[in-house]
Image (cartoon, rainbow, N blue to C red):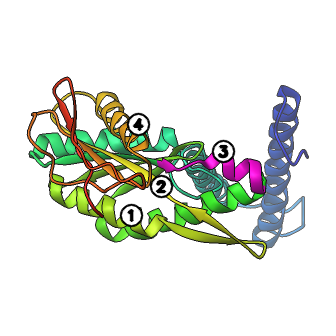
Amino acid sequence: MPSQIVTQRDVIRYTAGRVVAAAGITAIVTIIFLISDLGTDWHATVEVGAVVKASLVVALSVSTTLSGAMAYRSARLMRQLTSTRAELMRMSRTDPLTGLLNRRGFDEAAATQLAQANFAGQPVVAMMCDLDRFKAINDHYGHNIGDRVLAEVGDILRDFAAPRGMLIARHGGEEFAGLMVGVSDEQANDYALELCRLCATAVACDGRLVAVTMSFGLAAYRGGELSALMRRADLALYRAKDLGRNCVVLLDDGGALPMASAEPSGGVREAEIARDHRLVARNL
């Protein structure tokens, strides 16, 4: 019998094998029971009731045993199939390098959380962040070191996000995304500042220390789709890059001064107003 069912021929062979096995078991059990109950004298006279009784017992015993065995096997196969599907789904939504959600997984989970928060009237803040000058790290140290840096930063983000109920993901390349539900703009800003400090570190790789910093962009939810919210967080991230990197920028739609942001490494402290958005960088 084939260990794997791939073609139609495999299906037919597998089915035929099971039919032959079931017929053989039925015949063996029937013969054994009839001999034990009616004896081996083929010329003996027996009552019709005894034959009917023996036939019913055999039929019920065989059908129950085979049904139970097939049901048990089917249940095990279904459990294995369910487990495999769940694992495949998890893998399709997980970044293999960092173990965080990938972009697909983040978009699905974030859309659900955003809808629930919107229904409950909870505040939501989106976060986009990425490693500063990551291309230079790859070019200077090699992609293996770059992967180590990404993995370690992923651990920092995960360890910080998990106890605070933050949704965090690797959005692609050196870019990460987050969603904070039920926190104010000020709390979200404080979280991002703390992450900015934690990620300003040196990653030990093959006896060398690789200096790492990250830039963060935040955007508060003011209605609309998740994609629009993430675009605004991405805009804030770009402004953080423009302001010198290694900082936090909070994008505000209302024209009011955001709660606070981090001072970039370049020392820029002045507010920039772009259309109806105000972006501010202050001291860490």
Q: Amino acid at mark 4?
A: Tyr
Q: Which mark is residue 135?
A: 3
Q: Amino acid at mark 3?
A: Lys
Q: Amino acid at mark 2?
A: Met
Please tell me which of labels 3 and 4 falls first in the chain.
3
User: Which residue is at the far top?
Assistant: 275
Dot 3, how many residues are within 10 Å of its Cα: few (below 14), some (14-19), or many (20+)? some
**Residue 76 colored magenta?**
no
Report the residue at 67% width, 48% height from top: 136
Q: To which residue does mark 1 refer? A: 195
Q: To which residue does mark 4 refer? A: 238
- Please name which of the two marks, 1 or 4, marks the residue nearer to the observer: 4
Report the residue at 18% width, 38% height from top: 252
Q: Please, what secondary structure does the residue beneath circle 4 have?
A: helix
**Of 184 and 107, which appears nearest the observer?**
184
Q: Which residues are magenta?
A: 130-141
Q: Please, what secondary structure does the residue beneath circle 1 have?
A: helix
Q: To which residue does mark 2 refer? A: 214
Please tell me which of labels 3 and 1 falls first in the chain.
3
- What secondary structure predominates along the stretch shown in magenta? helix
The reply to whether residue 179 is in sight is: yes
Q: Is residue 1 above or below residue 13?
A: below
Asked where in the image residue 272 lies, by quadrant, the reply is top left
Q: Amino acid at mark 1?
A: Leu
Kindly check if marks 2 and 1 are in contact, taking CB atoms under 8 A apart as contact: yes
Q: Is residue 88 above or below residue 155?
A: above
Quadrant where the image shows the C terminus: bottom left
